Amino acid sequence: QFRLEESGGGLVQPGGSLRLSCAASGFTLHHQTTGWFRQAPGKEPEGISCMSTSGAVTQYADSVKGRFTISRDNAKNTVYLQMNSVKPEDTAVYSCVAGEPADPDQCGIDVLDFDLWGQGTQVTVSS
């Protein structure tokens, strides 16, 4: 069974940092394009970051560029999202995703690029 499980969410103050983890089971994570989405109440899912299978290419939404960093530990079969300088508007449920790669050095942050989703972890940014 293919599965993604997120952890690391919680309450953080504005300007603070948080690291989300996503452990894959049943498949090899770095054989897939991986990424992170988030969904705030009443809003559509927003793709915020992706990483190609080669690991050489990453992309970020403008809303998080320069503040969030995606990374991957192949030995642990885990992808991470480091969130720095968080803002109240970053409050959302964050989900990691995986999908078949079209190219080992490409990735996109469109919902159609991914077919496996984790359950999500809540991140709340508030003082």
Image (cartoon, rainbow, N blue to C red):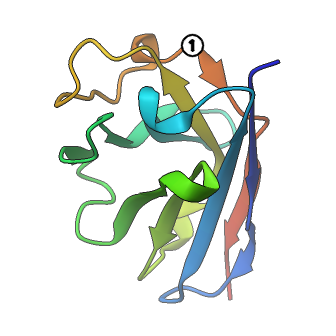
Q: Quadrant of residue 41?
A: top right
Question: Mark 1 highlights which residue?
Answer: 115
Quarter holding the N terminus is top right
**Residue 9: horizontal and vertical position, in percent?**
74, 65
| Residue at 53% from the left image edge and 27% from the top image edge | 98
Point out the residue furthest to the front here.
75
Relative vertical location of residue 123 with respect to residue 27 in this rendering, above or below: below
**Residue 126: horizontal and vertical position, in percent?**
67, 79
Relative vertical location of residue 53 with respect to residue 59 in this rendering, above or below: above
| Residue at 75% from the left image edge and 21% from the top image edge | 2
Residue kind at label 1, given as amino acid type = Asp
Q: Secondary structure at mark 1?
A: loop
| Residue at 53% from the left image edge and 84% from the top image edge | 17
Tell me if I can see residue 33 in this picture.
Answer: no
| Residue at 48% from the left image edge and 76% from the top image edge | 86
Question: Which class describes the residues within 10 Å of circle 1: few (<14), some (14-19), or many (20+)?
Answer: few
Tell me if I can see residue 4 in this picture.
Answer: yes
Q: Quadrant of residue 63?
A: bottom left
Is 80 positioned to the left or the right of 118 in the image? left
Relative to the observer, which residue lies in front, 11 or 113?
113
Relative to the observer, which residue lies in front, 15 or 113?
113
Is 66 positioned to the left or the right of 44 in the image? left
Q: Quadrant of residue 71?
A: bottom left
**Residue 43: horizontal and vertical position, in percent?**
58, 32
Relative to the observer, which residue lies in front, 26 or 91?
26
Is 81 positioned to the left or the right of 93 in the image? left
**Residue 101: horizontal and vertical position, in percent?**
34, 17
